[in-house]
């Protein structure tokens, strides 16, 4: 069975269950049981989507999009720097697992600029692989729409880039992307 087909089945089951729960006058304990089942189904769906998401591939796709954008503005492509990739990956993991969104202390490093991106939800949000596959383009488009982030992508005298992507789940999900350049 394809993942799209499974996703559609899961969404339909969740919709049917939620309609069933809201349409009939269950006693409180039955409503709670049905609600718990619905929460469990959403968490299972989100877990499947997260497990199928490749953070490293997402990071590389984001770099491709940044370089494509730079090229459209007459700038050179940035080379991947493994130490910057490691830094960005570790920091995106820190942000996701600690439920934070704040810039690191790049002033104490050779890093010239840093961009952050966050996508998160809590509670009953159904996450799909298809949605996660759009994250690199959503991220870069968001940065283009922000003066400061756009400026960071278009610094002319930087030559290297590192991007780290990390997603965690706990009563929802939290995905962070960190871009650093020097």
Image (cartoon, helix red, strand yellow):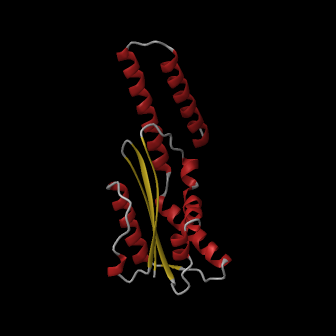
The quarter of the rendered structure image containing the N terminus is top right
Q: What is the quadrant of residue 90 in the picture?
A: bottom left
- Return the residue nearer the eye: 125 or 46: 125
Residue 44 screen position, x and y as percent: 44, 37
Residue at left offset 50%, top offset 20%: 22
In the rendered view, tell whether residue 174 sits above or below residue 114. above
The quarter of the rendered structure image containing the C terminus is bottom left
Residue 115 screen position, x and y as percent: 47, 69
Q: What is the quadrant of residue 93 in the picture?
A: bottom left
Residue at left offset 51%, top offset 84%: 158
Residue at left offset 38%, top offset 68%: 103
Residue at left offset 42%, top offset 32%: 39
Residue 91 screen position, x and y as percent: 36, 66
Residue 69 screen position, x and y as percent: 63, 73
How many numbered marks does the figure carry? Answer: 0
As drawn, the residue found furthest toward the bottom would be 157
């Amino acid at each position: 069975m394809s993942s799209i087909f499974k996703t559609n089945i899961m969404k339909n089951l969740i919709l049917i269950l939620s309609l069933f729960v809201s349409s009939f006058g269950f006693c409180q304990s039955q409503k709670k049981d049905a609600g718990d089942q619905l929460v469990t189904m959403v968490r299972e769906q989100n877990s499947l989507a997260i497990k199928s998401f490749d953070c490293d591939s997402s990071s590389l796709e984001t770099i491709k999009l940044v370089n494509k954008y730079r090229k459209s503005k007459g700038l050179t492509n940035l080379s991947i720097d493994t130490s910057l990739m490691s830094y960005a990956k570790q920091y995106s993991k820190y942000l996701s697992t600690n439920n934070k969104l704040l810039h690191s202390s790049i002033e104490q490093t050779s890093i010239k600029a840093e961009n952050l991106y966050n996508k998160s939800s809590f509670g009953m949000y159904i996450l799909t692989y298809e949605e996660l596959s759009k994250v690199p383009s959503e991220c870069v488009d968001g940065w283009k729409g922000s003066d400061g982030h756009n400026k960071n992508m278009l610094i002319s005298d930087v030559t290297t880039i590192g991007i780290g992507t990390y997603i965690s789940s706990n009563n929802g999900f939290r995905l962070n992307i960190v871009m650093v350049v020097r």
